[in-house]
Image: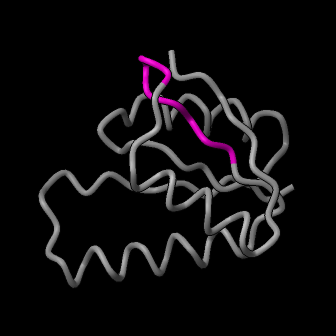
Amino acid sequence: MIITLCGSVAYPELLVRADRELTLAGHAVLAPLPMGRDVTEAEMGELTDTHHAKIRMSDLVVVVRKPDGSIGEAVHSEIAYAESVGVKVEYREGQ
């Protein structure tokens, strides 16, 4: 199965952990890459387009929640996008 991870890049360790576990379970995992710096508005648009392309290629989107259980505004937007293109969404607690 192809799975795209959605979650806060402010918590890269949570995304890496989810990626590792899902990859070891036999899935192809697509994940956002923390930039390590502020991005320009143009870059943000390109990153959003690229992430949407990953979502469209996927069988499933796995949302990795922040440690406090919340989901940020950008991730809510990605969830809405996934649902609009018919990709199933599941949630995973960030720990």
The residue that appears at 29% across and 38% down in the rendered structure is 10
In the rendered view, does 64 fall on the left or right side of 68? Answer: right
When the figure is inspected, residue 89 is found, relative to residue 12, above or below; the finding is below
The span shown in magenta is 62-69
The residue that appears at 54% across and 49% down in the rendered structure is 6
The residue that appears at 46% across and 56% down in the rendered structure is 32
Q: Position of residue 38 (x, y in %)?
A: 12, 59
Q: Position of residue 74 (x, y in %)?
A: 40, 56
Q: How many marks?
A: 0
The residue that appears at 87% across and 55% down in the rendered structure is 1
> In which quadrant of the rendered view does residue 90 lie?
top right
In the rendered view, does 64 fall on the left or right side of 34? Answer: right
- Front residue (pair 8, 27): 8
Colouring convention used in this rendered image of the protein? one colour
Q: Position of residue 77 (x, y in %)?
A: 50, 61
When the figure is inspected, residue 75 is found, relative to residue 51, above or below; the finding is above
User: Is residue 66 located in the magenta-colored stretch of the structure?
Assistant: yes
User: Is residue 61 located in the magenta-colored stretch of the structure?
Assistant: no
Q: Position of residue 18 (x, y in %)?
A: 61, 33
> In which quadrant of the rendered view does residue 42 lie?
bottom left
Q: Main secondary structure of the magenta part?
A: loop
When the figure is inspected, residue 35 is found, relative to residue 90, above or below; the finding is below
In the rendered view, does 35 fall on the left or right side of 67? Answer: left
